[in-house]
Image (tube, rainbow, N blue to C red):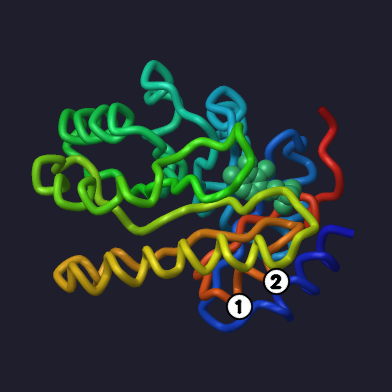
């Protein structure tokens, strides 16, 4: 049951760690079950599915976008997302900033860091991040709230530990180098169903959980 799953996960989350319910591929009836159990932060990964679900759900939901976003799909996502977690290229970062400026808004985003040893994962390499942070004064339509990362899909706990601790170190380094950003650059999004318990040990402030809440996705 979705309500039981949510209750069990919340009981294990330290205070101050946000639970993001990853609802991709699940029908809105399932999302409503989570909503009725008190869940208010949801995340989707495909622009069309995101834009279709938002108007069907209550308006007090905080929507995050966590999938690959092409610049020709910005209008499906940016008007509704309170956080775009998956900014994975400089071109996308600049495009979101331009969109935000044109709309008179500042769009909250996370920089996605490529940390895993899996080939397919998107994101910046850790050594690209400092230069992006330096470039922010020229990108007034975005506000970087922090980092998002995915660990390797592996049973090797030591490897996952190493990856999450590297992201955590990068996050701490940015905050140390830029005290002026610390007030809002305070989100470290890492951990999914298979590894969120490890992620919170490394200081995740937000975990993104799908399967452990909703069960297996129907592809
Ligand atoms: C699908 C997805 C998740 C959730 O995955 P589960 O294993 O179902 O918890 C988390 N983060 C991202 C970026 C995803 O695409």
Specify whether residue 174 is in view.
yes
Query: Which secondary structure, mark 2?
Result: helix
Is 71 situated left or right of 213 in this image?
left
Residue positioned 76% across, 66% down in the render: 6
Point out the image quarter for the N terminus: bottom right
Residue positioned 22% across, 35% down in the render: 97
Residue 124 drawn at (x, y percent): 40, 42
Is 58 situated left or right of 3 in this image?
left
Instruction: Report crowding for label 2: few under 14, some 14 to 19, many 20 or more residues within 10 A (C-alpha).
Output: some
Please tell me which residue lies in front, 78 or 196: 196
Give the answer, above or below, for where 127 lies relative to 182.
above
Please tell me which residue lies in front, 57 or 78: 78
Point out the image quarter for the C terminus: top right
Residue 156 drawn at (x, y percent): 76, 60
Badge number at residue 211: none
Q: Which residue is mark 1?
A: 201
Residue 24 drawn at (x, y percent): 68, 38
**Is the C-beta of the residue carrying label 2 under 8 Å from the nearest atom of ligand 1?**
no
Q: Are marks 1 and 2 in contact (CB under 8 Å)?
A: yes
Q: Which residue is mark 2?
A: 197
Specify whether residue 32 is in view.
no
Give the answer, above or below, for where 123 lies relative to 15.
above
Please tell me which residue lies in front, 170 or 9: 170
Residue positioned 82% across, 65% down in the render: 5
**Is the C-beta of the residue carrying label 1 under 8 Å from the nearest atom of ligand 1?**
no
Query: Which secondary structure, mark 1?
Result: helix
Give the answer, above or below, for where 123 lies relative to 203.
above
């Amino acid at each position: 049951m979705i309500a039981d799953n949510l209750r069990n996960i919340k009981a294990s989350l330290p205070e101050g760690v946000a639970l993001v319910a990853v609802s991709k591929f699940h029908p809105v009836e399932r999302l409503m079950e989570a909503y009725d159990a008190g869940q208010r932060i949801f995340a989707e990964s495909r622009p069309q599915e995101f834009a279709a679900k938002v108007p069907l759900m209550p308006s007090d939901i905080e929507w995050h976008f966590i999938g690959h976003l092409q610049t020709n799909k910005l209008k499906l996502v940016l008007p509704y997302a309170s956080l775009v977690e998956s900014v994975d290229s400089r071109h996308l970062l600049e495009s979101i900033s331009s969109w935000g400026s044109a709309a008179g808004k500042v769009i909250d985003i996370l920089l996605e860091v490529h940390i895993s040893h899996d080939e397919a994962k998107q994101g910046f390499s850790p050594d690209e991040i400092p230069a992006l942070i330096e470039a922010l004064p020229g990108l007034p339509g975005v506000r970087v709230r922090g980092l998002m990362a995915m660990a390797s899909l592996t049973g090797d706990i030591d490897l996952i530990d190493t990856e999450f601790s590297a992201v955590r170190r990068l996050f701490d380094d940015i905050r140390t180098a830029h005290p002026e950003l610390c007030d809002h650059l305070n989100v470290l999004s890492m951990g999914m169903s298979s590894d969120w318990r490890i992620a919170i040990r490394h200081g995740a402030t937000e975990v993104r959980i799908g399967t452990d809440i909703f069960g297996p996705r129907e592809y």
